[in-house]
Amino acid sequence: MIEVGNSTGTGWIIEDDWMITNEHVVGSNQFVIVFIPDPSSESGFTSMQGQVFGVDKKKRFSRSKS
């Protein structure tokens, strides 16, 4: 899951530390919070900051690195 301000959306891990999501999830933001499932965590998730490295408005995808 990806959180930006008060909005959330889904994302997909495509390789180590890289994920993609839909462009409308990140909008014009440069940073996002990424939640990764973690059964050992009390909340069930581990969170980390991700930096947006590119947005393709035509294809409506965004690529982020955590």
Image (cartoon, rainbow, N blue to C red):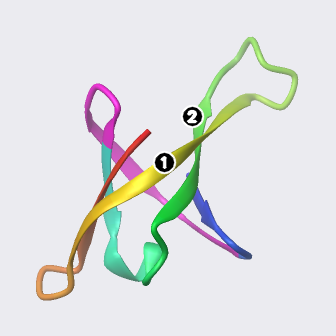
Q: Earlier in the sequence, mark 1 or mark 2?
A: 2
For mark 2, does the 10 Å Cα neighbourhood hold few (<14), some (14 to 19), or many (20 or more) residues? Answer: some
Residue located farthest toward the left when viewing the structure as drawn: 58
**Residue 36 counted in the magenta span:** no
The answer to which image quadrant residue 61 occupies is bottom left
Binning the other alpha carbons within 10 Å of mark 1 as few (below 14), some (14 to 19) or many (20 upward) gives: many
Q: Quadrant of residue 55?
A: bottom left
Place of residue 19 in the rendered image (x, y in percent of width and height, measured from the top left)? 32, 46
Left or right, residue 16 beside residue 40: left
Q: Main secondary structure of the magenta part?
A: strand
Residue corresponding to mark 2: 36
Kindly indicate the quadrant of the structure image that contains residue 16: top left
Label 1 vs label 2: CA separation? Answer: 12 Å
- Residue at the spot 13% in from the left edge and 80% down from the top edge: 59
**SS of the residue at dot 2?**
strand
Give the residue type that dot 1 points to: Gly
Place of residue 28 in the rendered image (x, y in percent of width and height, measured from the top left): 43, 83
| The residue stretch that appears in magenta | 7-18
Residue at 45%, 67% (x, y): give it.
30
Q: Indicate whether 41 appears above or below 8.
A: above
In the rendered image, which residue does mark 1 sit on?
50
> Relative to residue 32, is residue 15 depicted above or below?
above
* Relative vertical location of residue 29 with respect to residue 54 in this rendering, above or below: below
On the rendered structure, is 25 left or right of 53?
A: right
In the image, 65 versus 12, the foreground residue is 65
> How many callouts does the rendering have?
2
Q: Of discs 1 and 2, which sits in the foreground?
A: 1
Give x and y (percent) for residue 51: 43, 53
The quarter of the image holding the C terminus is top left
